[in-house]
Image (spheres, helix red, strand yellow):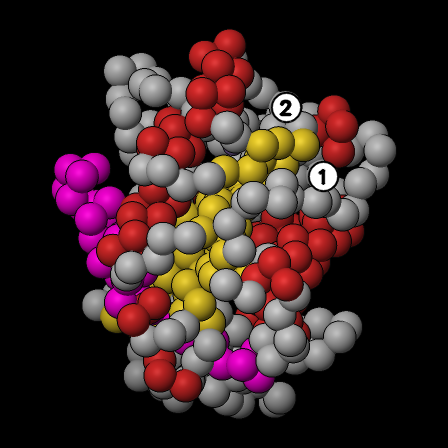
Amino acid sequence: MTAPKDATRPVPPGNQGRRRLAGRSTRGQRSFSFLATEIPPTPPEQALFHILPVPWERSVSYGGGTAKGPAAILEASGQVELWDGHGIPAAAGIYTHPPLDVRGKPEAVIARIARAVAAILALGKIPVVLGGEHTVTYGVIRGYLQAGYRDFGVVQLDAHADLRDRYEDDPFSHACAMRRVVEAGIPLFQLAVRALGEEEVAARQRYGVGHIDAEDLVPARLTSLTLPADFPPKVFFTLDVDGLDPILMPATGTPVPGGTDWYQTLRLFDSLAAQRQIIGLDLMEFAPIPGLHAPDFTAALLVYRLMGTLSRRRGQPETATTSS
Ligand SMILES: [Mn+2]
């Protein structure tokens, strides 16, 4: 005998109210907020960190799935402990924007990303952008320019240089993302690169791109770096998850062995934040693997730990290099 459809099912004990904030439903589509299960919703003007999900995927060259990256990270963030070992980064306030509309021509999507980022900066907040493919970062950087930022550079952790002029005839391929950034006159410094072509070596010289490649970074287990003295005082940090070693982070379209491990990644970021003012960050190219949830949690925790470094840096006197 089957129970009538409208029968009230008993709620298992201990399950009442749990996860109530997770997966707020909009028109049948689940949408998540960062740490939604752990922190109450924070109004945008009270949150230091503004998470912007940009599920844009169009020029994937190998494996796909980055369109599902932001939602998987937000969902996994529900499992992250508020205490990160040093403090509670979430106390600075985290506001999660609805996923950005990524339909339309690349130029239109890039302009939309730029507007969204410029709006966050106009509020005096720190953008934390979740991709999506690495082309998103070009839109993010355009947003800083639109908001009036000039004296800033980009530090990139990535297996790839992304400095091609065109890839498969596409100037907005993720393989060209950093080329578009340096062409806009933004200084660039690269970490953990281990896959690049001759054209990109030439582009590094032409645009004065500094770098510590994986060969020099990973076997020596470097945990600190020194940016060139003339590198700008403000830095945007772009993290392509394939910069990490694929043993730690297999969930990405173009994995390359020989990347950074967990603690090296965190400490390199600490070192960066100690010498420059970090004005925002992004995490790109995360492509969740169905049935394998460890990388989702790794990406979510990584975002939270980077926010932790920034929230602790705020309020501390800036070093000489970041005073202008
Ligand atoms: Mn890459």
> Residue 92 in the image: x percent, y percent?
54, 81
Residue 117 seen by the camera: yes
**2 left or right of 267 in image:** left
Numbered disc 2: secondary structure:
loop
Q: What amino acid does circle 2 point to? A: Arg
**Residue 128, image quadrant:** bottom left
Residue 82 seen by the camera: no
The residue at the point 32 percent across, 18 percent down is 166
Magenta-colored stretch includes residue 101: yes
Q: What amino acid does circle 1 point to? A: Thr
The mark that comes first in sequence, 1 or 2, is: 2
In the rendered view, tell whether residue 116 sits above or below residue 20: above
> Residue 184 in the image: x percent, y percent?
32, 37
Numbered disc 1: secondary structure:
loop
Residue extent of the magenta highlight: 90-119
Looking at this view, name the residue that lies furthest to the top.
Answer: 198
> Residue 129 in the image: x percent, y percent?
42, 56
The residue at the point 50 percent across, 57 percent down is 234
Magenta-colored stretch includes residue 126: no
**195 left or right of 81 in image:** left
Mark 1 → mark 2, Cα distance in angstroms: 11 Å
> Residue 203 in the image: x percent, y percent?
45, 20
Q: Residues within 10 Å of mark 1 (few under 14, many from 20)?
A: many
- Image quarter in which the N terminus is found: bottom left
User: Which labelled disc corresponds to residue 260?
Assistant: 1
In the rendered view, tell whether residue 288 sits above or below residue 70: above
The residue at the point 64 percent across, 63 percent down is 320
**15 left or right of 215 in image:** left
Looking at this view, name the residue that lies furthest to the right.
Answer: 220
Q: Residues within 10 Å of mark 2 (few under 14, many from 20)?
A: some
In the rendered view, tell whether residue 197 sits above or below residue 255: above
The residue at which mark 2 appears reads as 194
